[in-house]
Image (cartoon, rainbow, N blue to C red):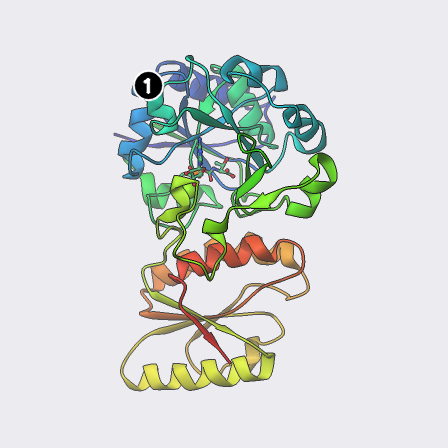
């Protein structure tokens, strides 16, 4: 299949391209599109056959449910059995935006979309292209991140093409995404709302709006004995091809450790990648060093993470050493993704 890549600079000017994409979705086909978090691979969420195509294109396990994307809050009630009281409050505070809510589903949502679950994940993305595509197609677009299962999520249309070229009919290219890590997922079917995946919207931000929230014990980094509630969080996701190891501790010690480990690996003929910050970039003596940005700018760190992992894939490095980025606000989400990519290999110095 030929994959058409269409650049969208303005949804009014490029309305015809969005119409073509919407027709593909209505006919049960797949279209990749930008959101503010990462690129999504979309299909009509209420069409079981269409959802199945997503799993095939990504090579995704069929028990891993999809997020249904909507463009207006009223549509949430059309696919939920009932709306919990927090839904409206969270909509008013954060939608459109990087938050996904899990509620009980009704019969309109096929089990093919929810991976066999009786609940459905719903999100209203904050991106003009995503919203236009949802509006112009069926109103309900199931979309996981538009990467091959197990690879880092795509933050550029080029990343989508790398993974899915020849497998889907169309990619809408809206340029680089704004946030760079996937949405926060909050489960509203629990007595106390529970965060199943950390993201740009922090537990504190949620608490301000709906009161107490819990964190799924299964996603807390050091604890691999408990099973995460979001099926997707149990897979070694976001994985680069190389072996990734995090080095955590005081800056000078981290630099020294990474330099020692890199020298050892280089002697053995290994190709090493290093993820540094702007501040530490020039302190590394050997290896291919890429800076993730200034340590003080956590938004930029989030934006660059997946792109850097892909760059190291392209360079065919054998090993990646990374500094750790437990920054104050979205650091929890950044470290959650990095620890998963590293298969929890951390060296503390
Ligand atoms: O930012 C995002 O959320 C992006 C963009 C494209 O919107 N989408 C995304 O989708 O990250 P995906 O499929 O890569 O991740 C969805 C996560 C998975 O971990 C999945 O297991 C979980 O959401 N999930 C979906 N429905 C669920 C449900 N009913 N119960 C528990 N977890 C669910
Ligand atoms: Mg994903």
**Ligand 1 closer than 8 Å to label 1 CB:** no
Q: Residue at x 39, y 63 (%)?
A: 312
Q: Residue at x 68, y 64 (%)?
A: 296
Q: Position of residue 315 (x, y in %)?
A: 35, 64
Q: Position of residue 201 (x, y in %)?
A: 63, 43
Quadrant including the N terminus: top left
Residue 268 against residue 215 in the figure, above or below: below
Q: Residue at x 61, y 15 (%)?
A: 74
**Quadrant location of residue 300?**
bottom right
In the image, 122 versus 238, the foreground residue is: 122
- Quarter of image, ligand 1: top left
Residue 346 against residue 41 in the figure, above or below: below
Label 1 sits on residue? 48
**Quadrant location of residue 22?**
top left
In the image, 187 versus 21, the foreground residue is: 187
Residue at the far right: name it: 208
Q: Position of residue 221 (x, y in %)?
A: 48, 59
Residue 77 against residue 329 in the figure, above or below: above
The number of numbered discs placed on residues in the rendered structure image is 1
Classify residue 339 as left or right of residue 168.
right
Residue 266 against residue 188 in the figure, above or below: below
**Quadrant location of residue 311?**
bottom left
Q: Residues within 10 Å of mark 1 (few under 14, many from 20)?
A: some
Q: Residue at x 56, y 76 (%)?
A: 249
Classify residue 201 as left or right of residue 242.
right
Q: Position of residue 348 (x, y in %)?
A: 49, 77
SS of the residue at dot 1?
helix
């Amino acid at each position: 299949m030929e994959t058409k890549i269409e650049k969208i600079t303005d949804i009014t000017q490029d309305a015809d391209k969005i119409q073509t994409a919407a027709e593909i979705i209505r006919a049960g086909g797949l279209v990749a599109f930008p959101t503010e978090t990462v690129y999504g691979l979309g299909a009509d969420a209420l069409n079981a056959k269409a959802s199945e195509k997503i799993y095939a294109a990504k090579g995704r396990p069929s028990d891993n449910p999809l997020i249904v994307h909507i463009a207006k809050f009223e549509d949430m009630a059309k696919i939920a059995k009932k709306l919990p009281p927090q839904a409206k409050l969270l909509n008013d505070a954060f939608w459109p935006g990087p938050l996904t809510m899990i509620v009980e589903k009704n019969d309109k949502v096929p089990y093919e979309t929810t991976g066999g679950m009786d609940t459905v994940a719903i999100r209203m993305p904050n991106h003009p292209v995503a919203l236009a595509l949802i509006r112009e197609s069926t109103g309900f677009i199931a979309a996981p991140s538009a990467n091959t299962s197990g690879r880092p999520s795509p933050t550029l249309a080029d990343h989508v093409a790398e993974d899915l070229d020849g497998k889907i009919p169309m990619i809408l290219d809206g340029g680089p995404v704004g946030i760079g890590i996937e949405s926060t997922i909050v489960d509203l079917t629990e007595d106390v709302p529970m965060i199943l995946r950390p993201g740009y919207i922090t537990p504190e931000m949620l608490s301000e709006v709906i009161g107490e929230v819990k964190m799924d014990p299964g996603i807390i980094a050091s604890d691999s004995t408990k099973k995460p509630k979001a099926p997707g969080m149990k897979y070694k996701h976001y994985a680069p091809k190389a072996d990734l190891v995090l080095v955590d501790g005081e800056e000078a010690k981290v630099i020294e450790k990474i330099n020692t480990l890199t020298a050892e690996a280089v002697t053995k003929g290994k190709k090493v990648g290093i993820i540094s910050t702007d501040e530490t970039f020039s302190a590394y003596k050997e290896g291919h060093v890429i800076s993730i940005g200034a340590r003080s700018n956590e938004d930029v760190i989030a934006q660059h993470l997946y792109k850097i992992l892909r760059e190291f894939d392209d360079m065919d490095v054998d090993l990646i050493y990374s500094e750790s980025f437990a920054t104050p606000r979205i650091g929890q989400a950044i470290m959650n993704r990095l620890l998963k990519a590293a298969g929890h290999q951390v060296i503390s110095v």
